[in-house]
Amino acid sequence: MDTPVALVTGASSGIGKATARGLLQRGYHVILWCRTQAVAQETEAEIREDAHASATSTVGADLTNFDALRNAATALKDEHDRLDVLINNAGVLKETRETNPEGIEETFAVNYLAPFLLSHLLLPLLIRTAQTRGEARIVNVGSDAHRGAINFNPDAMTKGDAGITAYMQSKLALVLFTNELARRLDSTGVMVNCVHPGVVATNIWRGPGVLSWLVRRLKWFFRSPETGAEGPLHLATSDEVKDVTGAYFDGTDRTTPSIAAFDEKAAAELWNRSMELVDLDPGDITYDPSGK
């Protein structure tokens, strides 16, 4: 009953799997969120070779499918009475434009709107945990690629480019979201931070395009998933950041994001547009620990 619970999206490989292993080593019950239940069970079976085999459970839901995400979040709230850490780690880079059932470009849908929606759906559980256990944490795995999205348009999620442009825009949106959610949750005990894990050799580069081909040829320059996981694990578990919220980290070091990350007008437009696209009613969301 006293075991802290952490949820990691994109837990089947790369930084997500390394982060899950690190949390298990630190005594957490880890919920492995993967694209399908079959992949989730395969990941769990592999991780069960570790010492903390009993401290895992699984979720199989494609983050491009917001209905599946909603159903999974509802099931999680029924199955768990606490959530100490939510790590929004899953990410993609689609080199050609593909859209989800809502018509949203998939890079933007997975990298930004899915964390936006999942964080809101699990807020009651996170806030309740913070009130009873002293704190809860949301860790958004971002990227310094957000610094390249100079001409950010909050409507880019339904219009515009795919590939690296969409990736940069999605990561800037994630930083803007981190700042705003931290502000709204200021009195709840839920800390919200964003971390750049470094350039890591992960499956995000597995596509057929020229960029993916080039990156795979140079991947020996990149950090390992285990090194990339150090930042998320630091924000999820370290006492050094116990009261830190609304911050941006490069690995375990706090740093300053791009100037665009402080654009309050863009943040407000993005927030309102995001609520519409994921079909959240602002009247149904409370950021107050009293539930008012």
Image: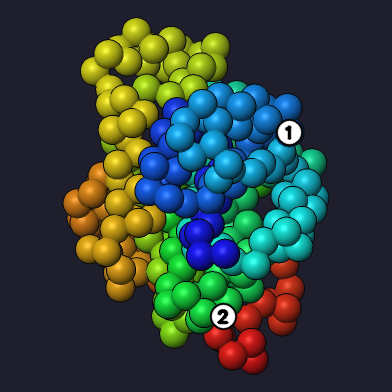
Amino acid carrying label 1: it is: Gln
Q: Which residue is mark 2?
A: 287
Among the 4 quarters of the image, the one containing residue 104: top right
Q: Residue at (58%, 77%) from the top-left corner? A: 128
Which one is nearer the viewer's eye here, 234 or 200? 234
Amino acid carrying label 2: it is: Tyr
Q: Is residue 207 above or below residue 14?
A: above
Q: Residue at (20%, 55%) from the top-left corner? A: 255
* Element marked by disc 1: helix
Which one is nearer the viewer's eye here, 17 or 263? 17
| 107 relative position to 181: left or right | right
- Mark 2, residues whose alpha carbon is within 10 Å: few (<14), some, or many (≥20)? some
Q: Is residue 49 visible?
A: yes
Q: Earlier in the sequence, mark 1 or mark 2?
A: 1
Mark 1 or 2: the one toward you: 1
x, y percent for residue 158 = 66, 46
Task: Give the alpha-carbon distance from disc 1 to disc 2, as whole Å.
Answer: 31 Å
Residue 267 - label = none
